[in-house]
Amino acid sequence: MRLALVNLAYLVASVLFILTFKGLSHPRTAVRANLTGSVGMLIAVVATLLLLDWGQGVQVYGVILAGLVVGSLIGALLALRIRMTAMPQMVALLNGFGGAASTLVAGAALLEELAQGRLPSTQSTVATVAAGIIGAVTFWGSLVAFAKLQEIMPGRPLLFRGQQALNVALLAASLLLGAWLVAAPQATWLYVLIVALCTVLGITSVIAIGGADMPVVICLLNSYSGLAACATGFVLDNNMLIIAGSLVGASGLILSRIMCRAMNRSLGNVLFGGVGAAVVTGAAADAVYAGRVKAASAEELAMILESARRVVIVPGYGMAVSQAQHAVRDLANLLESRGAEVEFGVHPVAGRMPGHMNVLLAEADIPYEKVREMDAINPSFAQTDAVIVIGANDVVNPVARTDPKSPIAGMPILDVDKARTVIVIKRSLSPGFAGIPNPLFAADNTLMYFADGKKAVLDLMDALKQAA
Amino acid sequence: MEVLAITLTVFVLAMFVGFEVITKVPPTLHTPLTSGSNAVSGITLVGAILSAGLQLTTLTTVLGFLAVVFATINVVGGFLVTHRMLRMFKKK
């Protein structure tokens, strides 16, 4: 009877998780959706506590309670202190912890079966192996992603000879050892060995991926953390874990696909292509830029913005780096107070995770209706008087449309070059992640303003105020 | 074998529900979607609590305890940070 009630509670939690994702379809319902999810989690945890043997008393609950308290403190501290610009690192770290938990749970479940003198079923052992592999890759891969995003490690791809062969060999060896474990579940050292191999695999596979491809990596690791929970569900025969895990798995897969499409690249190319390792040669850059780049002063730019009726601001990772989102909001308000129409154009892969720019703009109190997606804003550039590109490069590079041999060929871009004037705020002419020069910077209708993003926006505002 | 058939059914159906529901999330909310789904993947906490509570051997108790800590960071951190972000989208 108690088991049936607990399972019903799990059903309620599963439904609440589905409603969580459903509610995230609109910013108005999203806050409630997230709360729904946390209530689902609370129900699941309380039901599980009731499942435990009450007779054993304080000692049992003490260990659990200690874990819950320590975890909650660390989690709350991270969540409340993290800056919005550092959200990609935060999510990478959390993905990793989810994966680690699944690996530990699957391992413990195997030991428990054996300690009770039972042999785990084939289904259970297969799922244990899956949880071990996916969880360990997720944990270590996420730590590498975190280190890259936090700039503890260099962001460029770290490649060495035979890297892919090594990765394939590690995965193949893990699967073989996994098959062995299924045949002989008593040999628990095999599980330890699998986790060790996948530790190496997680590290060697993610170090090969460059900083600007992190949106895809984060989505994929997110998906893995869900699939690891799902595998744990198969180990424990728990439908709620399977449902919640596959929802997350699906979410991560969908997002990785969207990100890949936005770069016109396959998932394989992102994971194994080592894109971003090449460095642009000075000669190639000279051929594009020599004598054609026009740098403008803040006063000149203010004159152009003064008379502009429609302005579109295109933010990129550079805006996040210089924490310029609040200054950008002030500039937008200033332009609007002068009668201009201001909108924001966001490329799907701008920033270091999907939706990164939208969060920063929301943090600066910019209404989400003014932040437009690429497909929605592209037709309007021809009627736009001025575009301000701040800290974006590859996503506005017209070479994507014109040169089929370029590394970004066919990537959908924001067509800012169609606007009457393009103002590019950038620290230097250094190339973006793709490592290629950007002819936009040398275009007739482009004016460069070389400065740190935040300082540049403040300079522009000063000049605008003085012009009035 | 019968149990496997049922769990597989649940898995496949849940995947479909996931694809249907998540394709409707607008790009504006993709970061909160990632962090929120992250929190949900902390559901493995349930398995962790069982191991930490069963306390069959010292090793499984330690593994269970560590898993509870990791999963709780995931759950609490995930839901809280998502809440922080979504509140910014709501206000005008």
Image (spheres, rainbow, N blue to C red):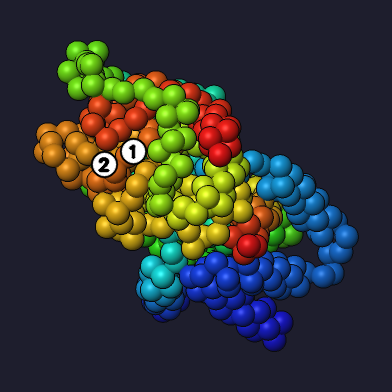
> Going 52% across and 60% down the picture, which residue do you hit?
A368
Q: Residues within 10 Å of mark 2 (few under 14, many from 20)?
A: many
Image coordinates of residue A259 in percent, x first then y, are 34, 50
Is residue A130 shown left or right of residue B72?
Answer: left
Q: Do the residues labelled 2 and 1 touch (CB within 8 Å)?
A: yes
Mark 2 or mark 1: name the one nearer the start of the chain. Answer: 2
- Res A464 seen here: yes
Element on which disc 1 rests: strand
- Res A237 seen here: no
Is A412 or A70 nearer to us in this picture?
A: A412
The image shows residue A220, relative to residue A168, as above or below, that is: below
Is A198 or A442 nearer to us in this picture?
A: A442
User: Of all residues shown, which one is farthest toward the right?
Assistant: A58
**Which label sits on residue A422?**
1
Dots 2 and 1 on the same chain: yes
Classify residue A227 by image quadrant. Answer: bottom left
Is residue A308 shown left or right of residue B57?
Answer: left
> Going 37% across and 44% down the picture, which residue do you hit?
A386
Q: What residue type is labelled 2?
A: Asp
> Going 59% across and 44% down the picture, which residue do you hit?
A330
Residue, disc 2: A417
Is residue A121 shown left or right of residue A49?
Answer: left
> Going 34% across and 34% down the picture, which residue do you hit?
A393
Q: Which amino acid does label 1 sit on?
A: Val
Quadrant including the N terminus of chain A: bottom right
